[in-house]
Image: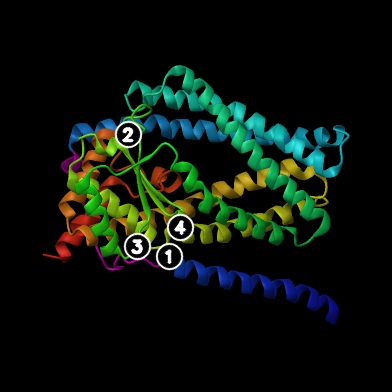
Amino acid sequence: MSEMTATRIARPATITVAALAVWVVAAFFLLRTKVPADLNPPHLDARNVFGTGATRAGARFDRFFELEWIVATLATFGVLAVFLVRGPSLARRLGLGPVNAGVVTAVFITFAVWAVSVPFEIAASWWSRRHDILQKSWSSIVFDPLGGLLSTTVSTTIVIAVALLLARRLPRTWWLAAGGIVLVLAIGLQFLLPYLQRLGTHPVRSRQLAAQVRTLERREHVGRPVVRVAPVSGDTSAANAYSIGIGPSRSVIIWNTMLDGRFTPREVRFVVAHELGHLARWHIWKGIAWGVLFGLPIFGLVAYVTGRHGGLRRPENVPLALMTVAVAGLVVTPLANAVSRRYEAEADWMAVQATRDPGAGRALFQDFVRTDLQNPDPPGWVNLLLEDHPSALARVEQVDAWKRLHR
């Protein structure tokens, strides 16, 4: 073997090992949380904690969505497989330039995937409506998927156009540049989206809750994010809250269904403490960082797979690129869910630390199972592939462990 050949082999291998080492180190630091590693929570029986009736009702309700996810995923990959075979000839027959042909091909595929998904979305809405979780009218349910088509088409068009343009100028390193652009877009969205999400919301009107929010902000050293209430009771009976935003756009949005009397003031305070915990522990920024850790290797894989067939400069490789992204996304889903569950567990820990009220946390998770028809202890494969939050049982076990540590 010549010295030049050995160098050509050694350099990519060295870069790959270095990149892997950086990935592992970054993941290690991002996974660190305030939850003690040796917490050793108790192992509880869901039927004893939530009641046999609520446990069975939650399992029965969620089973429909689990089966629906399996069939919908198979249908999606079936569509992608068809375009993997037929898509290249479609791109060639369009008679457009490489970039335009690739974008139009991607839009065709996006529309086909959306069309296949619509029956499943309507079925899910029917199931939720049948159980009085969803309150929307049937006309709204039928037309809602159009909004998803629009947003998905726009985002797909932008990403594919950027990737194709970069692939023409940077045949070997386009995926690195694309990752940088997507990172900038992600940061921009996290900054701007909260301002849009606040539209139609109102400030916390309860003086007691507003005072509790200020106290929790001081205890969690989170500053003064915007806390708003979203009127969603016309659409759903489910209760929820979420945190979003970075910098001055940091926000906590509480659904008004949390404040309709089904949850005690102590439980609502725990929810707010949980969401403030996300902001205090920089989970939004960490999520963006994980997007880079997952996204760059996926982009690199797309570059490698399409590169074996002439690269992404050729529009007929767009179906292969989209199939690669879909497969890679499914493969990394268990890891992404595990990361999310870890951060949710940390937010629960921050909440119980700030409120010093494990009883409120326990009651909250019990009430979520009852009001939202949650399965408190889903099967292992569901937890792996579908759940980005710890199970209600795991959350109760954690607050019970906190109580045991602070007797």
Discs 4/1, front: 4
Inspect the image, locate mark 2, and give the three-letter code of the amino acid beneath it. Answer: Ala
Residue 146 horizontal/vertical position (percent): 57, 27
Cα–Cα span, label 1 and label 2: 30 Å
Q: For the residue labelled by badge 3, is the local secondary structure a helix, a strand or a loop?
A: loop
Pick the residue in front: 251 or 69.
Answer: 251
Q: Nearer the viewer, mark 3 or mark 1?
A: 3
Name which of mark 2 and mark 3 comes first in the sequence.
3
Horizontally, is 345 left or right of 181 in the view? left
The residues tagged by marks 3 and 4 sit, at their Cα atoms, a distance apart of: 12 Å
Residue at horizontal 85 percent and vertical 79 percent from the top: 4
Q: Residue at point 81% right, 40% down?
A: 100
Q: Earlier in the sequence, mark 3 or mark 1?
A: 1
Q: Which residue is mark 4?
A: 248
Question: Looking at the image, which residue is at 69% across and 34% down?
Answer: 109
The residues colored magenta run 32-50
Instruction: Measure how far apart labels 3 and 1 are at the Cα level.
Output: 20 Å
Whether residue 101 is visible here, answered yes or no, is yes
- Distance from disc 2 to disc 4, alpha carbons, whole Å, reads 29 Å
Q: Nearer the viewer, mark 2 or mark 4?
A: 4
Q: CA distance from mark 4 to mark 1?
A: 25 Å
**Residue 46 lies in quadrant:** top left
- Residue 326 disc label: none
Image spot of residue 321 (x, y percent)? 71, 46
Q: Secondary structure at mark 1?
A: loop
Q: Which residue is mark 1?
A: 31
Residue under circle 2? 238
